Structures are given as C-alpha cells and as structure tokens.
Amino acid sequence: MNQKVVFIWQRWSWKSKIWEKVAERLNKSFVDWDDALNEQMQGESISDYVKRINWYHLRKTQEHPVFKSLMEWDKDIISLGGGTTTFWEVENLNTSETFSSEVNAEILRSSWAIVIYLEATPEVLAERVENDLKNIENRPSLSEDEETVLEEATRIYEERDPKYKEQATHIINTVDKTIDEVVDEIVGLLEKEIA
C-alpha cells in the first residue's frame, strides 16, 4: 500500500476500536495519534497538560509536530486525533500570536491520502461517552462553560462535521451498526481502493 489511509472522527466515534481491526484484517502497518502524542508528552495526559499550560501550547508545540511526523512516517494506516485538522484557532494570551488547524489541514490535503470520516450523530456520541467513564476522565472538556455531555457533543459535532466532510474521501456512518459491521464496510472499501 503506497497510499496512506487516514482516519478522522468525532469524539467517541469508536475510532480506536475500528482502525486497529481494519489494519489487522488488511495486514497493514499502522500508527495511532494517541500513542504518538503520549510519547511526545512523556506520558502526561492531555487533560493534565491543558490544565497545567493551555490549549495553545498543546496545539502548537505538542500536537502539530506529532501530526507532521505521522504524515511522514512509513505507515499504511494513521488514526488522527479528533481535532487535529478541524477548524480551530488558538491564541497565546501572552503574545496574542495565533495558531490554526489550517496548517495541519493543508498537510492532509497535500498528502493524497484516503481519508475516512467515522460519522455518528451527537446523540449517539453522547450515549457512547456516558458509557465510557475512563474516556471522560482522560479527555479535557473542549469548553470553558459547564455543558452536559450531549450539549458538548452537539456543539463539537456542529463545528467539526462540515470540516470533516470537506476533508474526507469517504464517509462511514457508524450509527445503528456494530463495530464489526463498520470494519467489514471499511475493509471492503479499501480492498477496492488499493487493489
């Protein structure tokens, strides 16, 4: 496989349960955003890092270098972080300097990768996270306000969904499907794409 396959996804869309099975079924090499970022951050959780420093520093000095490295690595399948290439702009409050996800999005566009968007509705995403307490503890809120899980899932979905659909070469709806059904759909798609 010369063409990379990149997974993009809404928070809580079963990403980690899907892409590993796809890679295993196709016997392809893979790398996960969370693992690469964890190594870059020397084991500190994203939640703790954001509390200790801020989102700006995380996006620019931790996430961006990892993203560039992943796109350059000799791996067939890459699973990105949920917000890596979606529309955001963060500001350094000390210098007023900004950093935008457009930098990452442009790298993705120029890679000619097969980009698969794992889609689900906000209601389904919220239900999944409420059943996953570990995820809630390890992932920082993406809001300064007090939001319910459904409110946050809806807001983030509305912000990111158009961008994901713009970037994706294929959209896979994960609602009302089992993980194995989604994996079967993606494997069938990729076997045709990379044949």
Image: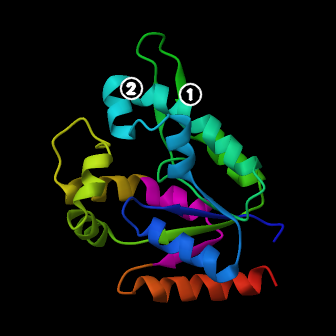
Q: Is residue 3 left or right of residue 100?
A: right
Q: Give the side of residue 5 with respect to residue 164, left or right.
A: right
Which residue lies at the image location 63% right of the left edge and 44% below the top edge? 67
Q: Is residue 193 above or below residue 113?
A: below
Along the viewing direction, whichever of 36 and 13 lies nearer the viewer = 36
Query: What residue appears at the point 40 percent right and 68 percent down from the top-left corner?
Result: 13
Disc 2 packing (10 Å; few <14; some 14–19; many ≥20): some
Q: Which mark is residue 54?
A: 2
Residue 61, label in figure: 1
The picture places residue 20, in percent across and down from the top left corner, at 55, 71
User: Label 2's element?
Assistant: loop
Question: In the image, what residue type sits under mark 2?
Answer: Asn
With 25 as the anchor, is 128 left or right in this view? left
Residue 193 versus residue 85 in the image, above or below: below
Image position of 7 with respect to 66: above or below: below
Q: Compute the Cα span from label 2 to label 1.
A: 11 Å
Picture residue at 71% right of the left edge, 53% below the top: 109
Instruction: Please say whether residue 85 is visible from this viewpoint.
Output: no
The quarter of the image holding the N terminus is bottom right
- The magenta-colored residue range is 160-173
Residue type at the position of mark 1: Thr
Coloring applied to the structure: rainbow
